[in-house]
Amino acid sequence: MSLINPLTSTQSATGQSPQANAISPQTAATATQSAAAAATVTEQQSTTGNPFLDGLRLPEENAVPDANNQELTQEDFFALLSQQLSMQDPFKPVENDQMIQQMASFSTVDGITKLNEEIVNLNALTSSSQALQASGLVGQKVLIPSDTGHISAEDPSMKGIISTPESIESITVRIEDDKGQLVDTFTVDGSEGGNIDVSWDGLDKNGQPVAEGNYSFKASGKVDGKSEELPVSTYAHVSSVSLGNAATGAILNLRGVGGIKIGDVLAVSET
C-alpha cells in the first residue's frame, strides 16, 4: 500500500488549474481571424458582384417602419367595415340605415377629394391657356391703373387717360420725374368730361429731351369750384409674358414699369 501526500495532491491540482483555464494570445488571435473570415464570407454571400443578380434578391426587411401618411383610403375603410361586422354583437347587429350612412359618407368624402384634384388640374390648364392668349399682347401697349410711364429711346413719349367725374373746362397736367421734381406742365381741355386723352412728347419745359427713366402724370382741375387731383392711367409697352400660377394668372412684364396681372389691364392699344 502506498501513501499519498495530501499536500502534494492539493498543490498539483492547484498548479494545473490555471493552465487548464488560460487562453494563449495565439489562440485568441486565431479566433478573431476566424470570426472576421466568417463575416467576410457572409458578406460575399449576400452580394454576388453582379448588379443584375443582386437586383433579383429579395430586399432586406427594414427595421424602421414607414411613416403613416394618416390618410384613410378605400381599402382602409373596407377593412374597418369588415372588422366592425365581425366584432359586432350578434344580438344587436348594426342597422342597415347606419351601414348605408357610413358607406355614403365615405363615398362623399372620396368624391370631394377627386373633385379637388380635378379642380387643380383645371386651374393649371386655365393658367396655361391664359398665358398662351396673353402672349398675343407682346409688343403692344396696354392701359394700366397707374400714373407712371417709362421714357426710352424706343418710346420717347407717354400717353394716358385722365378720368373726370364731370365736365372740366381746363385740366392742368404736371410731369414729374421719379424723384418728384417738376419736369413740365401744360393744360388740356376737359369740357367733354369722362375719359380725357393726354400725351406728353418727352420734352422738358426748355424743349430738351428728358433722360430715360420713369415719369408720372399728375392732373388737377376744379370740381364744384374746388381744385382736386384727378386719377390718371397710363399706357405701357408689353415686353414679355410670364405664366404665373393659378392664383395670379398670366403676368404681363411691362418695359421699365414691372409686372402686372392680366386681369388688371384696363384697355389694349394698337400702338
Image (cartoon, helix red, strand yellow):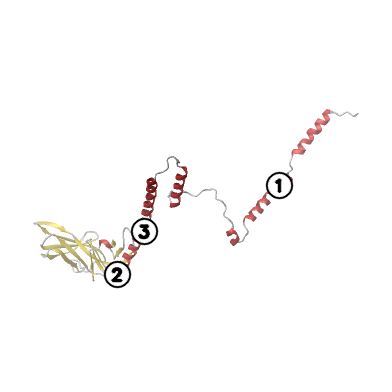
Rendered residue at 58%/59% (across/down)? 56
Residue 219 in which image quadrant: bottom left
Q: CA distance from mark 3 to mark 1?
A: 67 Å
Rendered residue at 81%/33% (across/down)? 12
Whole-percent x, y for residue 145 in the image: 22, 61
Residue 267 in which image quadrant: bottom left
Q: CA distance from mark 2 to mark 3?
A: 28 Å
Residue 232 in view (yes/no): yes
Nearer to me, 184 or 167: 167
Rendered residue at 71%/47% (across/down)? 31
Q: Residue furthest left?
A: 225
Q: Are marks 2 and 1 in contact (CB under 8 Å)?
A: no
Q: Badge 3 is on which residue?
A: 118
Instruction: Give the SS element for disc 1.
Output: helix
- The quarter of the image holding the N terminus is top right
- Give the answer, above or below, for where 29 lies relative to 205: above
From the viewer's perspective, tell me whether residue 48 is left or right of residue 178. right
Q: Badge 2 is on which residue?
A: 136
Earlier sequence position, callout 3 versus callout 1: 1
Q: Badge 1 is on which residue?
A: 31
Dot 3: few (<14), some (14–19), or many (≥20) neighbours within 10 Å? Answer: few
From the viewer's perspective, tell me whether residue 229 is left or right of residue 28. left
Dot 2: few (<14), some (14–19), or many (≥20) neighbours within 10 Å? Answer: few
Instruction: Give the SS element for disc 2.
Output: helix
Q: Amino acid at mark 1?
A: Ala
Q: CA distance from mark 2 to mark 1?
A: 82 Å
Whole-percent x, y for residue 33 in the image: 69, 49
- The quarter of the image holding the C terminus is bottom left
Nearer to me, 67 or 152: 67
- Give the answer, above or below, for where 15 lies relative to 266: above
